[in-house]
Image (cartoon, helix red, strand yellow):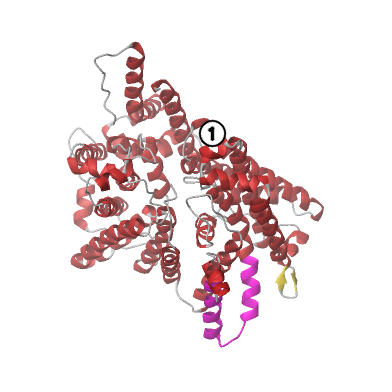
Amino acid sequence: MTQIRAVFSTPWIWSFVGAFVVWLATITFTGGVGGGGMLTAALSLAVFMVIVGVGQMFVITLGPGNVDLSLPANIGLASAVAMTVMNGQDSRIALGILAALASGAAVGAANYMLIWALRIPPIIATLSASFIIHSIDIAFGRGLQIKPPPGFADFTNVQFLGIPVMAMLTVLFTIGAGIALNRMIYGRSVLAIGQNLRAAWLAGVNVGWIRFFTYTLCGMLGGLNGALLAGYFRGANVDIGNEYLLSSIAVVVIGGTSVAGGKANIPGIWGASLFLVLLLTMLNTFGVSAGVRLLLTGLIIVGVITAAGGEKSLR
Amino acid sequence: MTDAVVEPSSSRAANSAARARMLRAMLPALSFALVVIAIAWLNPRAISYFGFSLMLNLAIPIALATIAQMFVIASNELDLSIGTFVGFVGCVTATWLRDAPLVGALILLGSIGVYALLGALIHLRNLPSIVVTLGMSFVWQGLAILTLPTPGGKAPDWLSAIVGFKPPFIPFPILAAIVIALIVHFGLMRTSYGAILRGSGGNPVALGRAGWSILRVKMTLFALAGLFGVLSGMTLVGITTAGDANIGNGYTLLAIAGVILGGGEFVGGRVSPIGAVLGALTLALAASPLLTFMKIPPDWQVAANGVILIVVLAARVLISRRER
């Protein structure tokens, strides 16, 4: 009994329960048809949310006010950079991914430079940066018609026993992120800064470097996401990352990470991502119009946040 | 705006600090003046009654949305849904408010009520306003699309008449901006309840101990944000004459930028209505007229906003350093 209670008191279990309920509702509606295929598709799409969600989680865990609003612009730019460098050739895939990572890292580093040099809240720093990145992307990536190399496009779609390989790799990645968060000096430092920046500093944590590294890491994950999205959707696009502003923050919060910082949760990001993706799938299956779909998505997000509750404001 | 009070026992250091504070308060006006001077230098003919009317055509809805955002920021929250809310109001204005004015007015009043309830929800459940308002941005956009699936509708005639008003000597957008800035400045900065409202961002605990209901204060601030969001959407449709569910999407970020440009701070209830209006006008001028005169392609308009924001914030850091 106490064990059951322990399971249900973990904050992230609810996101998986929610995802399961949504999935059940959908296959009940279809009469049991396509349940497996739906999960495969959901896993493929959830991967993109998980990757940026992990980056956003590290940033949010740094404490009140830390959030990266430049992810959509970052993802858009990285998708264009990756496609340009790959130039449709299989031999240049690794180079393209490296270029996307570098583009993302540059954005992340620039974000932290603004925060550090101008001593402004991260929200406004990443916001002003995103204005500029967005323009660079429009100027650089407009009319870019380069298709991803066939090998890369196949990789983003390949499945093993009905499970996308990319999802398996992302599970490995999240396990690594979990170890980094809970067992490594870096992760412990992030948590310490989020709980009390001054105490962490007095305890000898190099606050500046950890914050710099975290923003750069989040930027790099955004860059990686841009490259993968361009592969999955067969081409770069300025607006390819737009939905990840909301979803990167939402999966972190729904997944049980504290918006006040200092308390992070990796498994919850998977649960919340699956929940959001399956929710959209369900609304699509029900055949509702675009307006109703947006309306319900918004209401459900607000409802879930309200139910999950919060401790402190993000800022 | 911070009043530069010089203490009687002012040493040289205190004097310099006071000057820095003064400079800081003047920054929004200075950046606005700088953009106007740049435009005048590039194209002297733009500085005229007609030129300003054209260039600042869309500045009034932006200024109103910025004021709405400012009320939310005054209580240490952030509204990421104001843009889609403006779009929703626009759609309602172009359809219901014209065809069935009573229903339209009720919908708009109801949406202000929703804003007040959001303030209550965020306060009572201690929710991160960023996430709640991001969720709400989907709700408003969904409602806007349901109201007006394709761009269209028509602004009510009386609204077009108000927005098309041509006062003598002073262009309408400038006159309207002055009126908005002064009304909000008086209400928020010069009345006792305005001080209470700002106090919810400055020191909510002290405010609560003094017997004020933080819940009521938050609800009031969010309702005011809703009210100015409604005004912004209505004027926007009055100017563009038709509704479009996506018309206001860019306003969310513009409004935040305008508040910060106008000297507002994210925490501590430090906001400035006059600064916010000036910030909005600066962004409106810098985003397109200035770049057009500088022959910079429209691709870089968004970047211009980012650069202006960064330059002004950098200037503020330099001044603040002297303030200490």
Q: Nearer the viewer, residue B149 or B64?
A: B64
Q: Main secondary structure of the magenta part?
A: helix
Please check the rendered image and state whether residue A32 is part of the magenta-colored stretch, yes or no.
Answer: yes
Q: Quadrant of residue B174?
A: top left
Identity of the residue furthest to the front in this view: A2
The quadrant of the picture occupied by the N terminus of chain B is top left
Q: Three-letter amino acid code at disc 1?
A: Trp
Please state if A203 lies on the left or on the right of B113 as rendered: right
Q: Residue at x 61, y 70 (%)?
A: A42
Q: Is residue A129 visible?
A: yes
Q: Residue at x 30, y 38 (%)?
A: B277
Identity of the residue furthest to the right in this view: A91
Q: Nearer the viewer, residue B180 or A51?
A: A51
Q: Nearer the viewer, residue B37 or A27?
A: A27
Q: Quadrant of residue B114?
A: bottom left
- In the image, residue A178 lies at what x, y percent? 66, 56
Q: Which residue is mark 1?
A: A116
Instruction: Say which chain tag 1 marks.
Output: A
Q: Secondary structure at mark 1?
A: helix
Magenta stretch bounds: A16-45
Q: Residue at x 69, y 51 (%)?
A: A83
- In the image, residue A313 lies at what x, y percent? 42, 51
Q: Quadrant of residue B46?
A: top left
